[in-house]
Amino acid sequence: MKLIAIARKEFRQIGRDRRTLLILLFVPAFILLLFGYALNFDIRHVRLAVDDRDRSAASRSLIAAFVNSGYFDLVAEVDEKETTRLMDRDEVRAVLVIPGDFSRALRTGRPAPVQVLLNGDNATTATTVMGYSLTIIRGESAKYAPPSAAPPITIEPRIWYNPELRSALFLVPGLIAYIAMITAVVSTALSIVREKERGTMEQVRMAPLDAASFVVGKTIPYFVVSLASALGIVVVSMVLFGMPMRGSWLLLLAALSLFLVGALGLGLMISSIADTQQVAFQVALLVSFLPTLMLSGFVFPIASMPRALQLVTYAVPARYFLVALRAIVLKGAGLEVYWTDLLALAGFAVVVLALASVRLQRQWV
């Protein structure tokens, strides 16, 4: 009977703490759905551009072999100048270059080399795409020669931005976003809740201060600390892991600042909702850890995710930050390549700071 009484009391206590109950019930289901759909190592829907300088039946057959494989989506026909622009903008992940004498070489029995340009900022994806390309070209080459003969179509791969396919150059930018996001969100998520638990929130309300000023004032110290920490991570990554800096430090500072302001605003919004530091910490990890790891393109390519999950990724700020960070650090690209991503980061920061201010304003009165 004593056990039943204790169990009944605990059930009542859990029922009263609805936010904790919601986390306990929602988080496992959320993790299952997220990992079940996003945890996919198959690389599909690779954005392919073609530079066909031959314009023959043989070249069209090779292009069709890539498209019909199910791994590539033909998104553009390009020339040499357009190739650089699209690769810098990350609008294509691979470019198939077919030389002008391709069909003539096949007719005369000479080797017919084709070039495959790959975006190497994601070393894992580039390696997989290279394997797909080799398999497709070997299959197409078999049409023109008996099995015992040397394949007439050969592939000349060229990796852009990361010629050695070093995994560190892919992982380190993602880790920078991951670490910065978690530290910024968690630090501010606990700040207002700490005021509530210590009883100092009432004193703040009595001061001649509005909610917007309070939010900005809370953000500034954490922004300075988080920015210094993030820049320290960047410098350490360059020293220890050989991460290059091919772009502008000023643009890197702007991208980091916009990303951190949005992350800090998200933490403040969580802090305005939660009543205890424990709940704030759990929610902060939930909204920063999993989306940044799973839905930003850091580990798993967004193009390989289901369409519904791809739409969710547009609400993940790390998605835009990673595009800008890799463009600055690895590609040395200019602002014209990723200005839309910076604009998205700025929009996210404005929205979450405004929501945090509105939420606190309601509690202010």
Image (tube, rainbow, N blue to C red):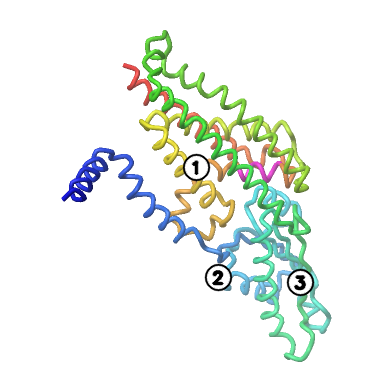
| Labelled disc at residue 288 | 1
Name the spot of residue 3 as percent of width and height, x first: 21, 50
What kind of residue is marked 3? Ile
| Labelled disc at residue 155 | 3
Q: Nearer the viewer, mark 1 or mark 2?
A: 1
Is 275 left, or right, of 60 in this rendering? left
Q: CA distance from mark 1 to mark 2?
A: 33 Å
Q: Earlier in the sequence, mark 1 or mark 2?
A: 2
Q: Is residue 281 above or below residue 65?
A: above
Name the spot of residue 178 as percent of width and height, x first: 58, 44
**Residue at numbered disc 2:** 70
Magenta-tinted stretch: 322-328
Q: CA distance from mark 1 to mark 3?
A: 42 Å
Name the spot of residue 305 as percent of width and height, x first: 49, 59
Q: CA distance from mark 3 to mark 2?
A: 20 Å
Q: Which of the 4 image quadrants contains residue 197?
A: top left
Q: Residue furthest top?
A: 208
Element at label 2? loop
Circles 1 and 3: CB atoms closer than 8 Å: no
Is 293 magenta? The answer is no
What kind of residue is marked 1? Ser
Circles 1 and 2: CB atoms closer than 8 Å: no
